[in-house]
Image (tube, rainbow, N blue to C red):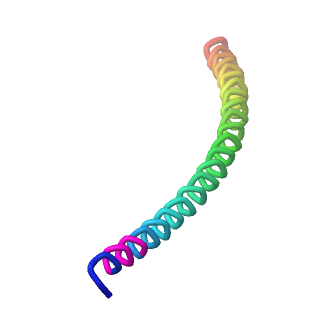
Amino acid sequence: MDADELTALATVISVAVALLFGAAGLSVGIVGLVQARRARAAAIGANKIAEKANEIANEANRIAETANGTINQQAARDTERSDVA
């Protein structure tokens, strides 16, 4: 083989290797994109669950405040009975 044939062969091999690495990079990129979309969908679901949990927590806080008010009223009544007696 002369120098021109060796250069052509090296060029073909280099292009083939570059295509192989390019194809591997493309496939990794596509898998990453698919996983990113799955993660986004999971995050949206998690946000919906968190919003519902916040609604439940707000309702629980409202109920707790009402209960505290009721207990404070009862304590005031108990104290008043003691003062009157």
Q: Image height check: is 37 above or below 21? A: above
Residue 83 figure quarter: top right
Q: Nearer the viewer, residue 73 or 48?
A: 48
Question: Where residue 59 appears, x then y in whole percent?
Answer: 72, 28
Q: Image height check: is 25 above or below 62? A: below
Most common secondary structure along the magenta stretch: helix
Q: Image height check: is 32 above or below 12? A: above
Measuring 54% from the left and 56% from the top, which residue is drawn there?
29
Q: Residue furthest bottom?
A: 1
Question: Where residue 27 appears, x then y in whole percent?
Answer: 57, 63
Question: Where residue 68 appears, x then y in whole percent?
Answer: 65, 25
Question: Where residue 6 appears, x then y in whole percent?
Answer: 32, 80
In reply to whether residue 65 is colored magenta, the answer given is: no
Q: Nearer the viewer, residue 41 or 73?
A: 41
Q: Which stretch appears magenta?
A: 6-12
Q: Image height check: is 1 above or below 22? A: below
